[in-house]
């Protein structure tokens, strides 16, 4: 199956309705995903990226229905991660002479993963071009850390298509492929989830790169990422979102994240939500038990928040492993410009709030002074003390 984008450009990827997770099990996929590869059939026939390794046979069989592999002039490998390069070894087995256009870091990641230093690598850097015939060319733009050091984007002149690879993608399956055919609410939820959980650590780099690409003043009719929808209806809308998201993004939202053993800490969490809602009715307040909720969805809510509160009871002089594991992931994401508060119950030693405070500070949050550290089960008086935390966060 190939799907027409514009002129002589086609999608030849894989819509993966059954995919449940990504990066091992580190990213939940709730609405399918896709690995988008593209075929340019001008005077030269160029493949842009491939698909994930398990889909290789289907991918190559489909490609062979469209072209004779002998007619391929080059492959552009925009990123070495195997969701895009996984079918490369099988393709190269059939066309070992095929030129591979990639960045210098692309050579490192591809040889490191596939161990074929003899492949015909053509190293490109920002501004380099590849003539595809009929007066058109591909212009390459290095996109280091969006998502790996090897990442790059490619811009097809005249057709004004930006093949952006991971940037501007989503793990979201849409059968009709284009953004105007997608459920718009789900699309933006999946786009922000993808940004929050995968690209947030690289926000300063993303911000600089976006400015660089914007300053190139390219006419962009289509943004064709390597996951999810192809942006053809107002494609710059997702660029505008990335500009917002890469600049210490926050909405008027406070998210409460906790786990509990015998419901004491749960009582504190829910009382805090009520106090915030009373003090600031316009603020969106969301409360999640971290042990029961998809960790990536909570991260998305934290990304949207201006403040969070994290609660755990004390256990073994420390905090619950569910909260500790989630905080480890949170730290990895390097979120900026957010406040936090801590709370928890204890029976005897009571280290929970101290540990939570340390972990959140390490994760880059500004932790407010008021906290709730309650011996045994909170009384009504102790619950009413959650108001002080609410006031500090609001
Ligand atoms: Fe979609 Fe970084 O791979």
Image: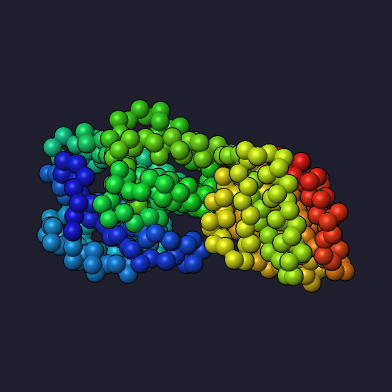
Give the quadrant of the C terminus. Answer: top right
* Residue drawn at the location 21% of the way across and 45% of the way down: 5
Residue in view at x 24 percent, y 69 percent: 57
Q: Say left or right for 98 vs 361.
A: left
Residue at 16% in and 41% down: 7
Residue 189 % position (x, y) = 45, 49
Color encoding of the figure: rainbow
Q: Point out residue 361 in the picture as x, y percentages from the top left corner.
A: 73, 50
Of residue 322 and residue 132, the one placed in the foreground of this image is 322
> Is 53 above or below relative to 169?
below
| Residue at image location 29% in from the left, 64% down from the top | 87
Q: Quadrant of the N terminus?
A: bottom left
Quarter residue 378 falls in: bottom right
Place residue 232 in its image quadrant: top left
Q: Position of residue 215 (x, y in %)?
A: 40, 28
Q: Is residue 334 visible?
A: no
Is residue 46 positioned above or below 30 on the image?
above
Tell me residue 98's x, y (percent).
Answer: 22, 57
**Numbered disc total:** 0
Task: Check the image and name the residue furthest to the bottom.
Answer: 316
In this rendered view, identify the residue nearer to me: 374 or 349: 374
Q: Does residue 345 show up?
A: yes
């Amino acid at each position: 199956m190939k799907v027409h984008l514009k002129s002589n450009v086609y999608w030849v990827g894989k819509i993966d309705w059954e995919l449940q997770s990504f990066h091992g099990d580190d990213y939940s996929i709730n609405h399918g995903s896709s690995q988008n590869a593209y075929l340019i059939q001008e005077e030269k026939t160029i493949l842009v990226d491939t698909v994930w390794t398990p889909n290789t046979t289907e991918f190559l069989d489909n490609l062979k229905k469209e072209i004779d592999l002998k007619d391929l002039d080059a492959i552009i490998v925009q990123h070495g991660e195997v969701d895009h390069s996984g079918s490369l070894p099988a393709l190269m087995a059939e066309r070992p002479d095929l030129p591979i256009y990639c960045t210098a870091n692309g050579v490192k990641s591809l040889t490191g993963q596939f161990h074929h230093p003899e492949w015909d690598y053509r190293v490109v850097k920002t501004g380099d071009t590849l003539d595809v015939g009929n007066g058109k060319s591909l212009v390459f733009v290095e996109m280091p850390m969006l998502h790996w050091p090897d990442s790059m984007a490619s811009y097809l002149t005249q057709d004004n298509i930006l093949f952006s690879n991971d940037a501007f993608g989503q793990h979201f399956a849409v059968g009709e492929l284009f953004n105007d055919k997608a459920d718009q609410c789900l699309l933006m939820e999946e786009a922000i989830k993808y940004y929050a959980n995968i690209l947030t650590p690289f926000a300063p780099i993303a911000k600089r790169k976006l400015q660089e690409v914007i300053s190139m003043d390219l006419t962009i009719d289509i943004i064709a990422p390597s996951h999810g929808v192809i942006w053809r209806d107002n494609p710059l809308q997702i660029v505008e979102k990335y500009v917002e998201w890469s600049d210490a993004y926050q909405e008027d939202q406070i998210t409460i994240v906790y786990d509990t053993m015998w419901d004491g800490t749960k009582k504190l969490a829910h009382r805090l939500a009520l106090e915030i809602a009373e003090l600031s009715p316009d603020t969106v307040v969301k409360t999640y038990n971290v042990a029961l909720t998809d960790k990536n969805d909570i991260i998305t809510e934290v990304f949207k928040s201006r403040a969070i509160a994290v609660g755990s009871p004390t256990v073994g002089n420390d905090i619950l492993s569910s909260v500790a594991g989630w905080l480890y992931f949170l730290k990895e994401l390097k979120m900026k410009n957010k406040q936090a508060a801590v709370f928890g119950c204890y029976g005897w030693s009571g280290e929970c709030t101290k540990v939570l405070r340390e972990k959140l500070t390490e994760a880059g949050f500004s932790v407010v002074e008021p906290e709730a550290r309650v011996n045994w089960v909170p009384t009504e008086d102790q619950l009413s003390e959650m108001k002080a935390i609410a006031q500090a966060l609001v």
